[in-house]
Amino acid sequence: MPAIAARKGSTEPFLIDAPPVNAPGAGDVLCRTLELGVCGTDREVLETAAPLLPDGEDHLILGHECLARVEQIGNDIEGFQVGDLVVPTVRRALRPSDVRIDMLDEDQYTERGIVRQHGFSAPQWLERPEYLFRVDDTLRAVAVLAEPLAVALKGIHEALAIQQARLSPYVWTEASPRVLVTGMGPIGFAALAVCRSLGWPVDLYGRDADDSFRARLVANFGGRYLPAARDDLSRDHARRQGYDLILECTGSDEVMVRSARALAARGVAVWLGSSRRPRPERHDLAQLMRQAVLRNHVFIGSVNAAPRDFSAALAHLARLEESHADQLQLLITARVAPEDSLWHYEHRAPQGIKTVLVYD
Ligand code: BGC
């Protein structure tokens, strides 16, 4: 079974023979990948033609959204058994720190499959137990979505913590926030799914036509679809009340500035996407600032996910399996063997959401 790798000087993904893995030493768990999600970050790593390589290597093995099975455990491992389903987290601290792992600065961590550490597209890999979450067998079909759900949940948890600190400890519990999600990619849909699991009303803003598969999926999740062609998120939204929480998942500065106009008084916007491509300055940022000052806005940049977010993601997946099982399955728009996956690392299919590589 091959692994998928990125190399310096090339924007193309490569199939490589997976490196042999040693038997687990003390404190290690040997895992076998069952399913692997492809995401925008994988495509971005490739687009740079300059992946951040592990020391002494000429390639980076991709893959950071993973469902795996425990195959062997080293000595001194408690809480895991051979056969357990697990989801690994992504980030590893380089040095012990009092700062929560997802809040570390860029030079203080590696990320499996993204930053200087090989990822999970290799069929087998070793991991420390503190970076693995056990997954109930009932979540076998959807647990590969845990990582993107955790990323969306981090944004929500951060926003909630700030609003509770500055407004009231009961904010968003007594009355649901009005939520706007921008973007129809995997993080946009993860944000939608989680908000619906919380019972919050959600509008999702995107570029698709009303009758597209993805627009219909928004409605199937119980959200309302706002097509960009008919709705420019003008200040009317704010006048009518506006959104208490905006989850920006397009990574487009243009959509971010436009959607900020619809932020309610005391609202909070979380930026979950970003673009590495330089863009010309062309927005009315003065207006963004003026509104932010007059209306006490908060903007949060959010990356990665804390252990609490992974636990919450698994709990929400279990709830969504009860309430929205069909819709969760529809988020996985392609299932391919690793050998046939390369196209998906360079393209997103029209109406595609999440491609999953199936290993068994
Ligand atoms: C991953 C995060 C990671 C980020 C930046 C995202 O795709 O989900 O865990 O921190 O990329 O590398």
Image (cartoon, rainbow, N blue to C red):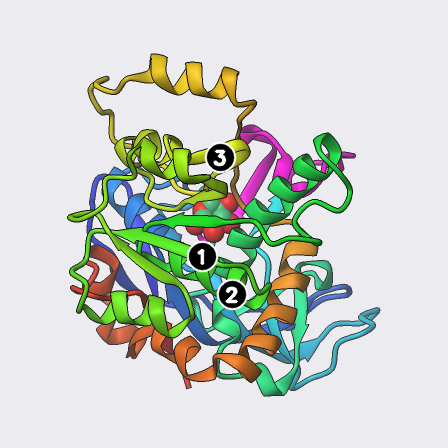
Q: Can residue 1 be seen in this view?
A: no
Q: Nearer the viewer, residue 304 or 204?
A: 204
Residue receiving disc 1: 202
Q: Distance between the residues labelled 3 and 1?
A: 14 Å
Taking 235 as reference, is 335 above or below it?
Answer: below
Q: Quadrant of residue 210?
A: bottom left
Q: Give the range drawn in magenta.
A: 93-114
State the separation of the CA atoms marked 2 and 3: 20 Å
Residue plotted at (16% across, 60% down): 209
Q: Are marks 2 and 3 in contact (CB under 8 Å)?
A: no
321 vs 18: above or below: below
Ranked by sequence position, the earlier of labels 2 and 3 is 2
Q: Which residue carries the number 3 mark?
A: 264
Residue 342 placement, left or right of 31: left
Where is residue 68 shown, x and y percent of the image?
54, 75
N-terminal of the pair, mark 3 or mark 1, is 1
